Image (spheres, rainbow, N blue to C red):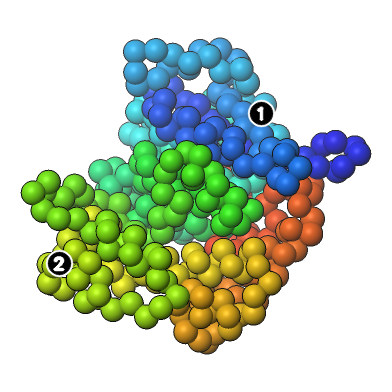
Amino acid sequence: MSPSTGFRPHRVVVLALDGLLPFELGIPHRIFGRPKGPQGRHLYEVVTCSVRPPGPVETDADFAIQVAHGPEALATADTVIVPASYELGPVFEEGVLTADLAAALARIRPGTRLASICTGVYVLAAAGVLDGRPATTHWADAARLQELFPSVRVDPDVLFIDDGDVLTSAGVAAGIDLCLHMVRRDHGTAVANEVARRTVVPPHRDGGQAQYIERPVPDPQQSGTTAARAWALGRLHQPIQLRDMAAQEAMSVRTFTRRFREEVGVSPGQWLTQQRVERARHLLESTDLSVDQIARDAGFGTAQSMRQHLQAALGVTPTAYRRTFRTRTAVTEGTEAIGTRVVESHRSYGGVGALRRG
């Protein structure tokens, strides 16, 4: 922390375990390493640590990585992220922590935000922090997770779950969605969207979106729905009928609806609502427009309609959401990045000091 400004970036510590997937290890560094405040200072500091003293950590590829920090780094974290590993040993086989992993996790301070990518959730579950809570992982590993940890409420169908101070995600790309979601939760839509643009990924996929779609890639001989989505995004402030979107692709409503769901994973109506919620969030964060005007510009029509949709999606009213981010703007680059949380269950968490041990 700089004594002159009181600013300290939010410290993200990524726990690298043997057998890790290099791609997933890089996700937190790529996403959290990008955001900057108005004065050009990084909003996050990202470090990687091992459960052992600094040294090599094996990956699932034909190379190892050199980790510069040992488990003591976990004691300095504001957020700890556990990426996937294919060599979890007793954690995956018996649902218990190894002695060195338990000792490392015991260093985490109470109140630290915890997150997992893919099979990293097994570590959090074995530590006991997911008991009675919702969680997700890659769909192929969900049944095993539920079998090992019956007290965890496993949802195999979603991209990620935000349960306040503990967040879990499905595999690979869902880890990007989760990290972008945390940036959005911490600093708002504009900051997250800028990170997404620089990373060349979609700025937002709702956590409740299905992670496995039977036909994720449309037949190349068939028309897609990309043009209809682009057309709709340019007209969110106007009433949009399903038949109008279908007409952009010269399809029947039935065919368009089926193809849309195959490509996007949700219905056209659900997708439109998601886009309008995102538009409203952006306007609430970045403008002084009235709630009534924002409701019209986002396509909700009335403030009451927008209020209902934001309450359903975010758990807060438009006024409360704006107040949260205006408060953050007033203290931009303050002492902590987390601030007031928007999409969460407001559950308290006592840390991982009391762990299951193998």
Which disc, if any, is residue 73?
1
Please say if 77 is above or below 307. above
Residue 208 vs 145, above or below: the answer is: below
Tell whether 276 sits left or right of 10.
left
Amino acid type for the residue under numbered disc 1: Ala
Residue position for label 2:
250
Density class for disc 2 (Cα within 10 Å; few <14, some 14-19, many ≥20) is some
> How many numbered callouts?
2
Farthest right residue in view: 4
Q: Please tell me which residue is depicted at 76% across the width and 47% down the height of the picture.
A: 333
Which x, y percent locates residue 72? 67, 26
**Mark 1 vs 2, N-terminal side:** 1
Q: Residue at x 49, y 64 (%)?
A: 278
- Callout 2 amino acid: Ala
Q: Position of residue 272 (x, y in %)?
A: 36, 69
The foreground one among 154 and 201 is: 201
Q: Residue at x 45, y 70 (%)?
A: 276
In this picture, is 33 found above or below 342?
above
Tell me residue 112's x, y (percent): 65, 46
Identify the element where label 1 is drawn: helix
> In the figure, residue 87 lies in which quadrant?
top left
**Which residue: 35% across, 28% down?**
86
